[in-house]
């Protein structure tokens, strides 16, 4: 099984290539409308430099620089925070199979994945209802051709 430490992070712009088409679910457009996409914008300039803040406000903050191919801090909580680094599963031939995608690093978002950030370590934490929160960020499964 691959680990996230072995896979390149490609960034939301690369995900957008396939996940922005209306006919396939327009997942990228849906993400752009979430607080995740704007997570860095919610921080003060000081907080945007604080590792304790950015570890949850930017996917890129906790990724080894050697694994960053297209990921940017400005993306905030991007696709790869919830779905894992896309460097190995990004190709259409792999994405056609959920099993192959998972074998190549795709993560299916679970409550455990979300609670890595949505927890009492946050100074603004007011509780976390996974079911309600998931409804706010969920997007259609990609439609295969």
Image: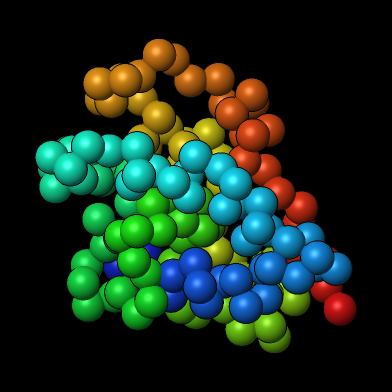
For the question of whether residue 45 can be seen, the reply is: yes
Up/down of 58 relative to 39, above or below: below
Q: Which picture quadrant has residue 99?
A: bottom right
Say left or right for 131 vs 121.
right
Up/down of 37 relative to 53, above or below: below
Q: How many numbered badges does the structure rendering display? A: 0
Task: Give whichever of 16, 46 is nearer the camera.
Answer: 46
Coordinates of residue 115 in the picture (x, y in percent): 42, 32
Coordinates of residue 14 in the picture (x, y in percent): 52, 77
Q: Which picture quadrant has residue 20?
A: bottom right
State which quarter of the image contains the C terminus.
Answer: bottom right
Say left or right for 143 vs 1.
right
Q: Residue at left 22%, top 67%?
A: 64
Coordinates of residue 15 in the picture (x, y in percent): 56, 71
Q: Residue at left 38%, top 76%?
A: 70
For the question of whether residue 81 can be seen, the reply is: no
Up/down of 33 relative to 98, above or below: above
Q: Residue at left 18%, top 43%?
A: 45
State which quarter of the image contains the N terminus.
Answer: bottom left
Q: Residue at left 49%, top 67%?
A: 12
Coordinates of residue 48 in the picture (x, y in percent): 20, 45
Colour pattern of the rendering: rainbow
Up/down of 76 relative to 137, above or below: below
């Amino acid at each position: 099984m691959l680990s996230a430490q072995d896979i390149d992070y490609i960034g939301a712009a690369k995900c957008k290539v396939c996940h922005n088409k209306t006919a396939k679910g327009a997942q990228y457009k849906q993400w752009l409308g979430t607080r995740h996409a704007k997570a860095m914008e919610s921080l003060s300039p000081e907080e945007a430099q604080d590792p304790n803040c950015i570890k949850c406000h930017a996917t890129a903050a906790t990724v080894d620089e050697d694994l960053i191919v297209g990921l940017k801090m400005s993306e905030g909580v991007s696709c790869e925070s919830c779905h894992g680094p896309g460097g190995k599963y990004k190709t259409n031939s792999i994405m056609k199979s959920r099993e192959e995608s998972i074998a190549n690093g795709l993560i299916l978002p679970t409550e455990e994945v979300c609670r890595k950030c949505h927890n009492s370590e946050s100074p603004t934490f007011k509780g976390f209802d996974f079911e309600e929160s998931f409804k706010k960020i969920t997007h259609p499964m990609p439609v295969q051709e």
